[in-house]
Amino acid sequence: MPQKSRLLIIEDEEPIRVGLEDLFVFHGFAVESAADGPSGLAKALSGRFDLILLDIMLPGLDGFAICDRIRAFDRVQPIIMLTARTADADIIQGLRLGADDYIAKPFSVTELVLRVQAVLRRAVQADPDGVRLQLGDLELDTRNLRGRRGAEEIPFTQREVAILKYLAAHAERPVSRDELLNKVWGYARDCGLETRTVDIHIAKLRRKIESDPADPRLLVTVRGLGYRLAGHGV
């Protein structure tokens, strides 16, 4: 019998927490939960979980602080943030701290299950063979998720590296948002999901690799077609 995926739900609203527990047990997950920030962080740092569903608004310690602490401990732990906040600033903050995805409340349970399955699928398929990408004056070690520009070291998330590797492998053409969602996030084509995650990740990457993120020369937008990685080497 295949081993169940282990899921940690950190959510303070009991009806939502219990509902999510029942939902993912039904879908074959081994589920644990926490109702506040400190106990959720303690469980998260145990390293026992394949994925963490993390609410932002929590008593004791908010989801941003928890995500930041997890990433200091484990840079590849899959995390999806649950939030009632839909402002781009809050979403960007969660993704900047290293969340793999976010989903806004109220959410479709079907969409949530699809996103969890996609993030887990991508984690399992992560390429263990690292390469070095030269992005302008920044050298990126994709295995160790670290870039270097002169004496400055810049950390990258696994998802950011996956985006750059995919764009580098298809640098001869623009890559659409839908293709990135399918190939990097693992979402099925035509599944009806709508997300700003791609655009937010591209904005994050530009702040890391571009000399002037407002005038990108490496990670460029091809109007109506998607994104292309220019001026890179391996």
Image (spheres, grey):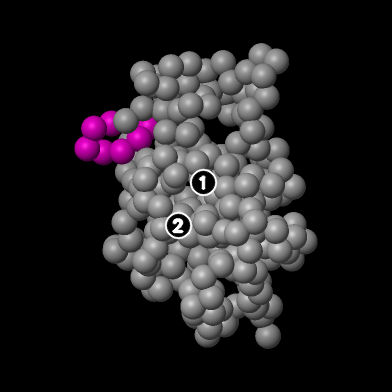
Query: Badge 2 local density, few (<14 within 10 Å), some, or many (20+)?
Result: many
203 is higher (above) or lower (below) than 210: below
Asked if residue 172 lies left or right of residue 120, the reply is: left
Mark identifier at residue 94: 1
Asked if residue 141 lies left or right of residue 168, the reply is: right
Residue 138 % position (x, y): 58, 21
Residue on which disc 2 sits: 83
Position of the N terminus by quadrant: bottom right
Of the numbered discs 1 and 2, the one sitting upstream in the chain is 2
For numbered disc 2, what is the local secondary structure?
strand
Asked if residue 6 lies left or right of residue 11, the reply is: right
Q: Amino acid at mark 2?
A: Thr
Mark 1 and 2 residues: CB-CB less than 8 Å, in contact?
yes
Residue 202 belongs to magenta span: no
Q: How many marks?
A: 2
Point out the residue furthest to the right here: 46
Q: What residue lies at 60% left-to-right and 78% top-to-bottom?
A: 29
Q: Which residues are magenta?
A: 222-228
Residue 215 % position (x, y): 36, 18
Position of the C terminus by quadrant: top right
Between residues 106 and 23, which one lies in front from this camera angle?
106
Q: Amino acid at mark 1?
A: Gly
